[in-house]
């Protein structure tokens, strides 16, 4: 799973992007075998003005043999926006990939079909 971090209107040095990559990797670790790439877009919604939902995190996950899954979360700070988006991404990926596993987490018989 390749993780790409894009920052828009926010300061993001190598240390910051490294921490975001680690957070995304650990939050989506159980989906790693099914994902080819995860893109994280971080931005300031109203460029310089402050507000309760000023920062935005959009996560686009690309599962193999499925359409991309995209979620967005806005919050007062970048870390809160990332946490909210990761929670939404986990739920969306659970739903999108549910047919690949049975209720106990074992590989599904339906996942073996030819595509």
Image (tube, rainbow, N blue to C red):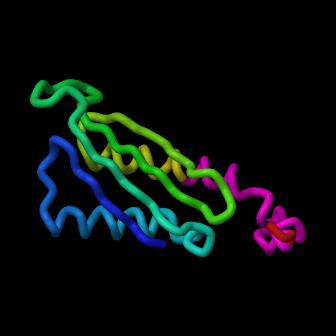
Residue 33: horizontal and vertical position, in percent? 60, 75
Q: Position of residue 16 (x, y in %)?
A: 19, 62
- Position of 31 with respect to 57 (left or right) is right
Q: Position of residue 73 (x, y in %)?
A: 40, 38
Left or right of 106? Residue 24 is left
Residue at image point 31% right, 38% down: 56
Q: Residue at x 43, y 39 (%)?
A: 72
Q: Residue 60, relative to residue 36: is it above or below?
A: above
State the image coordinates of residue 80 (x, y, percent, origin top left): 32, 44
For residue 18, which quarter of the picture? bottom left
**Residue found farthest to the front:** 115
Residue at horizontal 33 percent and vertical 67 percent from the top: 21
Which span is picked out in magenta?
90-112
Up-down relation of residue 96 to residue 30 (above or below): above
Magenta span main SS:
helix
Vertical position of residue 103 compared to residue 85: above or below: below
Task: Please state if 107 lies on the left or on the right of 77 as rendered.
Answer: right
Q: Residue at x 53, y 69 (%)?
A: 36
Within the magenta stretch, is there residue 27? no
Q: Between residues 112 and 104, which one lies in front from this camera angle? A: 112
**Farthest-out residue, right:** 109
| Quadrant containing the C terminus in the rendered view | bottom right
Q: Does 108 lie within the magenta span?
A: yes
Tell me if 72 is positioned left or right of 6 in this view.
Answer: right
User: How many numbered circles are shown?
Assistant: 0
Compared to residue 39, the image places residue 84 above or below, namely: above
């Amino acid at each position: 799973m390749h993780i790409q971090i894009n920052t828009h209107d926010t300061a993001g040095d190598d240390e910051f992007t490294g921490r975001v990559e680690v957070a995304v990797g650990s939050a989506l670790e159980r989906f790693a075998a099914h994902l080819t790439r995860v893109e994280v877009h971080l931005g300031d919604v109203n460029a310089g003005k402050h507000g309760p939902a000023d920062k935005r995190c959009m996560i686009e996950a690309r599962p193999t043999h499925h359409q991309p899954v995209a979620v967005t979360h806005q919050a007062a700070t970048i870390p809160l926006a990332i946490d909210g988006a990761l929670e939404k991404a986990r739920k969306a990926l659970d739903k999108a990939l549910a047919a690949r596993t049975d209720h106990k987490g074992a590989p599904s018989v339906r996942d073996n079909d030819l595509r």
